[in-house]
Amino acid sequence: MKIAYTQSILALSLLAAASFAQAATSTSQYFSDVEDSLATDGFNQLIASRLGSGTAGQQALVDGVVSNAPAGDAVLTRTYGNAYPASLGLYQWTGTDYSLFSITDNTLISDIGSIVFQSEVFPGGNQSLGGQSGLAAAISDVYLSYNGGNQLLAASSFTLSDAPVDENSPFWDPENPVAEGAVGYFTWDFSGISDPITSYEISFLVHLHSSVVAFQVDQIAAAVPEPSAYALMLGGLALVGFAARRKKA
């Protein structure tokens, strides 16, 4: 069942260019090296020559593909649709308007504070066959659930931007050098959740005739208050206690 999801797109070219200039991960040249990340799971080379073609490739997606770049234990699974490993990535062919994927992980860092999810998708790869165009065709309905629940939390913040033109990209088209792909950056902040988080599931849609290139998930520990913050807190408690004693007297 397709979940309604309203997207707002941040398309500031200068900011995007600055972000991509700082990208440095083993998963994708367009992904940012997330500051303070303590655990990273990446998925790339989602192609037939690695995952299998035909029925074998389809079954590999249904069974789940384990993080490979860098290696980890998160699993990417296709739970609905017809996307299959092709020559450049997971390709959504005819039959359904979209494919539904999930990334799950049951091995989280202790006291996790936030998760960052990055995606690289070539939107509407064959528009002449009916594929959608623009960034909105790349990825949508992005939600996170935790501890086996069905919370379906929208990201606390996200951007979806054009990847810069790269003549070395397999998607390079000299007749249409506008955008070589769409790169998403989604963040979930867990500071308002009191329960310990021990697992997560990120679900999302990829649309008709789009090509899935890479994903990456980073885990960041909860922020630890500075010593000065503890001092202020203790000072405040002392003042409250002093005021209470005076009032009682």
Image (cartoon, rainbow, N blue to C red):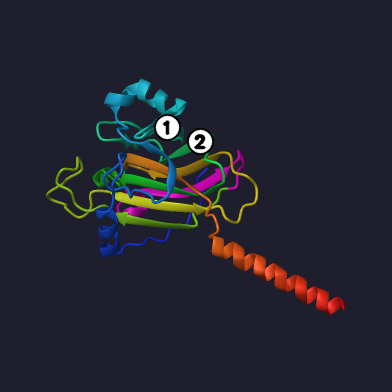
Q: Which residue is mark 2?
A: 105
Could you tell me residue 84's position as x and y percent?
35, 31
Residue situated in front as seen by the camera: 68 or 103: 68
Give residue 72's mark: 1
Q: Does residue 162 appear left or right of residue 152 in this picture?
A: left
Q: Amino acid at mark 1?
A: Gly
Labels 1 and 2: the sequence-earlier one: 1
Q: Does residue 14 appear left or right of residue 247 in this picture?
A: left
Q: Are marks 1 and 2 in contact (CB under 8 Å)?
A: yes
Residue reaching furthest to the top: 56
Could you tell me residue 60's position as x and y percent?
40, 25
Judge whether residue 133 is colored magenta: yes
Could you tell me residue 107's position as x and y percent?
52, 35
Q: Residues within 10 Å of mark 2 (few under 14, many from 20)?
A: many
Rendered residue at 32%/47% (across/down): 31
Above or below, comparing residue 35 to residue 243 in the picture: above
Above or below, comparing residue 140 to residue 108 in the picture: below
Judge whether residue 57 is colored magenta: no
Q: Amino acid at mark 2?
A: Asp
- Judged from the image, the secondary structure of the residue bearing numbered disc 1 is strand
Residue situated in front as seen by the camera: 29 or 233: 233
Residue range of the region highlighted in magenta in the rendering: 132-151
